[in-house]
Structure formats: C-alpha cells, structure tokens
Amino acid sequence: MLKTLDNALDLLKHFTREKPQWGVRELAKEMNISHTVVYRMLATFERYGFVKQEPKTKKYELGFSFLEYASTVKDNLDITELIYPVMKRVAEATNESVFLTWLDGLEGICLEIAESRQQVKYAMSIGSRTLLYAGASNKVIMAYLPASTQSAIIEKGLRPRTEHTIHDKEKLLQDLARIREDGWAYSVGEYTDTVFGIAVPLFSGDRQVVASLTIAGPDYRMPEQKVPEALRELRTAQQEVQAILQRIF
Amino acid sequence: MLKTLDNALDLLKHFTREKPQWGVRELAKEMNISHTVVYRMLATFERYGFVKQEPKTKKYELGFSFLEYASTVKDNLDITELIYPVMKRVAEATNESVFLTWLDGLEGICLEIAESRQQVKYAMSIGSRTLLYAGASNKVIMAYLPASTQSAIIEKGLRPRTEHTIHDKEKLLQDLARIREDGWAYSVGEYTDTVFGIAVPLFSGDRQVVASLTIAGPDYRMPEQKVPEALRELRTAQQEVQAILQRIF
DNA sequence: CCTTTTTGTTTCTAATAGCGAACCACTGGT
DNA sequence: ACCAGTGGTTCGCTATTAGAAACAAAAAGG
C-alpha cells in the first residue's frame, strides 16, 4: 500500500455534492495535514484533469477527467448498453422510472436509470452507492446473498434512513426470507420517503446474485392493486436481461 | 509535484476502451517499471474503488468510483441540467442529435448529448475529448479564441483525422476568420467521416467562448438546402442557453 | 501427470521522494 | 497602512518508496 497515493485518494473524497469547492489551506485544516502537502496533491491531480482550479476564486474542484473514465467504465460493462433498451421499454409501459442496481462488495451501485416520461427527481443518480438493507432494489439483492454476507452487512449497522426502514435484525431476516420465497420485493418509503419500489433479482451464470431491476416512483402512483401488473412487466424484463447476462458471465 | 501520485495517475491512463483489462506484470512491462510498483498502485486504487480485480482472471479494470465522481462533477456544472431541456427540444425538432461541447484548456470536452429518435451511434460519448481544429463543434470554439491560443493549438500539430480535415495552417486560419464573421460553422466529415455538423458558439459573461452547441448526424440526412432551417432552430436555442449562462458566470 | 513458465503477492534495504517549518507575493477587509 | 488571510515556493531531515529477489499458486506445455 502506497501512503502518498492513499492520502491523495482520501483527499478526493472531500469533494462532494455538498462541498464541491475547496481552498488549499481550508482543505488542509479539514484533513489535519500541512497545506503544502495538499497543494502538491492538488497540483498533481490538476495535471491530469482530475481537479481544476477556478481562476477567479483560486479554489479547486473536481475536473472533467472523471467523465472520461466513467464513460470507459460504462463501456467495459457493455451490459448497460444491452440492458438499457429493455429498461426503457418497461419505463414506457409502466410510466415509472426503472433502475439497474449492481452489487459491489457490501453495497449496491446504481448503474443505469431509464426515466419515465413523468420525470420526478430522485436522490438516486448513476454511480450513487446504496445500503443493501433498505428498499426493494437493495433487499432483493441481499435476500439472495449467503447468510455470512448478510450477517456482515447487518454487523456494519442498520441505521434507519426513514421511519419505515427495518432496523430490527430479526424482522429484516424474516423479510429477506419471504422475499427469497416470493422471488421479488415490494417496499414503500424504506429508502426514500414516499417512494415505492418493486424489484426482481438478477443472477450470473453461476447462480449468484449480481444485480436487481427496479420500478420506482412516488407512492401515490402505485396502489397495491396496480402492483401485479407492474410486476408482470418486470418479470418478462427480468427473463430477457437474464438471458443477456448468461451470455456474458 | 508528487512523483508517486504522478506515476499512479499515469497508470490509470492505460485503462482504455481498447484495453480495459491489465495483469500486473503485463502493465508493468508496458510502463517499463517494476511489477512490484504496479501492484502497490493497483492495490491502493482498489481500496478506493478506482480499480477492481476480476476474481476469475485476477486482472484489474477500472472501478465504479469513477461513476460516483463523474456524477458529482456533473452536479457542480448544474449547467447541464438547465441546458439539457433546450438541447432535447432541438433534437426533437430537427430529428438529429445535439451536442454540448465545453472548452477545457486546448481541447474540447463533450459534456452532454441529446439523442434524436433515429439513434445512430457516434464515436462521441460524454466525457470524450476532442481536438479543436476539426469539425464544426470544435472550430466554432477555436474561431473565437485569442490568436495566441489559436497558435498554441496549431503548434501542437494539425494531424488530420479524416481526409476532409483541414491540415494547412493558412487554410485553417482563413476558415476560422470566416466562421467568426458568420457566427456559426458547418462542416462535413472533418472529424468523423460522413458526419455533418452545424455549430454555434456560447459565451460567458465576459464575452469569452466557453462552449458550443452542435447539431450532428449522418451527412445524407442534411443536404445544404436543409441547413438554414436547422440553423434557425439552433440560433434560438443559442440565445436561450446564452441567457442561462450569463446568469451563472 | 509432472515440469516449466508465468502469474499475483510478500519481504527486504538502499536511496529516493515526500513532509513541513519557514518563506514570499499577493489580495481584501479594517 | 496595516494585518490576516490566501496560494505558491524552498530546503534539509527523514520517512517512504522502488525494485531485486523470493514466494506460492496457477496455467501452459510436454
């Protein structure tokens, strides 16, 4: 492990949506290190376009290089390209947005979004990480993970995101067991308030969960009696995507 | 400047669309450094999700963290969000794709794409960098740059991308002068073969070029007599976007 | 099936490269 | 005119890194 690189990558973490701009000394104070070091790291990052300095304020912010790398990442996963058309079709048929959530370690990552015509802005954006114990899109993945992995996730702590998040260990495990029986998940307001989710799992060639496909939107647009129809749509999509996935993995 | 970090960022450059996967020793040979060093860099990157190791092949590839950072980059530039609706409208009116190209140093960067219904795949994807001396979208930016900057771009070399790329210095400067007079640019097959482009410049509050707005597509769909109509559409979009830009910068 | 080669990973020590106090030049507020 | 703040620079001491050699494990080849 390289300490210099480690520090540098740690520095990047401080550039967030909430605080996208940092002065050299300001960031140094935040990180409890010398401003000289911060300056050197930023200067090096800048040569590669990972950060750039606003000429006016002299403050630094993330650079465009991330867009380049992100696009080659998405290219590697040509998955997205193959799956997107299917997602789009479901989005149009149900008039709700469809999400592809990928499993990455003990978290989920939103890899692709097919927006419905009636666009509503979610907290979710491509690349955002999610906790696996809350919300249909995540729980449906967690439900099919080996018990040991489930425990690991639970051990990391079940901090409720909303008042509907299941934060009791036993209740959660029961819920997961039921999801596994049903083969799909339905939740309302667990991850984001007033947002429903209907999700099905996706498996790799060797029967491991790798992702989930989710229909989500404002809860008032999906009363319980409309769920079966949406689920049917999702199920056929699941099979198509599954076929694509088998071919790759 | 930090050498360790410099080396590490240089390493990332080797993960391209064409070669997205690297073994440790393989990459070390390519970079002419010890495989031990490469291993350490990759291991450190992996802790932050910038690369990940495929368990089967043990080879490394770019990780999802880039998606996260890319999304916060795009968030900072809330520009995209404000401009996209306008682009989409033009795309639907003209039935061609619309591109937003941003100026970054001596290069252009494709920041946003509004696809037309009749989707054709381009070499262009969000985040991809372009040379400023070829193609309407780029030349219209270069035309409004100060002469010194233009020279700098020319000095870096005018390597033709297609047989229609202008590679003569004098011819290029003449062309740019004319574009500046007209206030817009039209080109066919300069950047990508058989692809036309109609572009207008976008200025910041202090009258500096910062970007361009472009309609592009297969050349057979845009005979010269159809250009004026497309241009009119683009012009009104230009004014709207300009208004948005003034408000920000 | 055993050998040979090649893989990712670990360990060690010389020597390079990074840290941080003190420094400068500049800006903006008082 | 001042002072407190900024970003950027210098330089010596020291901690960190590079790289040869060794490692286990897994392919490749006979």
Image (cartoon, coloured by chain):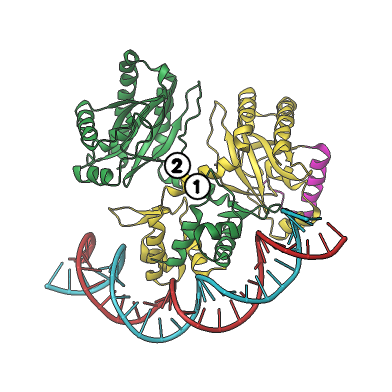
Chain colours: A yellow, B green, C red, D cyan
User: Would you place residue A125 above or below residue A89 in this image?
Assistant: below
Figure label count: 2
For the N terminus of chain B, give its image quadrant: bottom left
Instruction: Say left or right for B151 vs A194.
Output: left
Chain containing the residue with disc 1:
A
Q: Quadrant of residue B52?
A: bottom right
On the same chain: label 2 and label 1? Answer: no
Q: Is the magenta stretch mostly helix, strand or loop?
A: helix
Vertical side of A102 occupied by D11: above or below: below
Residue C8, quarter of the rendered image: bottom right
Q: Which amino acid does label 2 sit on?
A: Gly
**Place of residue D3 in the rendered image (x, y in percent of width and height, measured from the top left):** 23, 74
Locate residue D16, reporting x and y percent.
Answer: 50, 74
Amino acid beneath label 1: Tyr
- Kindly state the secondary structure of the residue where label 1 is placed: helix
Q: In this view, does B80 lie above or below A36?
A: above
Q: Nearer the viewer, residue C9 or A128?
A: C9
- Start-end of magenta stretch: A164-183
Q: Is residue A191 left or right of residue A185?
A: left
In this orientation, which residue lies closer to the viewer: B200 or A58?
A: B200
Asked if residue A37 can be seen in this view, the reply is yes
Magenta run includes residue B233: no
Q: Do the residues labelled 2 and 1 touch (CB within 8 Å)?
A: yes
In the foreground, B190 or B66: B190
Disc 2 versus disc 1: distance between alpha carbons? 8 Å
**Residue A102 % position (x, y):** 65, 44
Q: Name the residue under label 2.
A: B127
Q: In this view, does A79 lie above or below A96?
A: below
Q: Please name the residue that numbered disc 1 is placed on.
A: A69
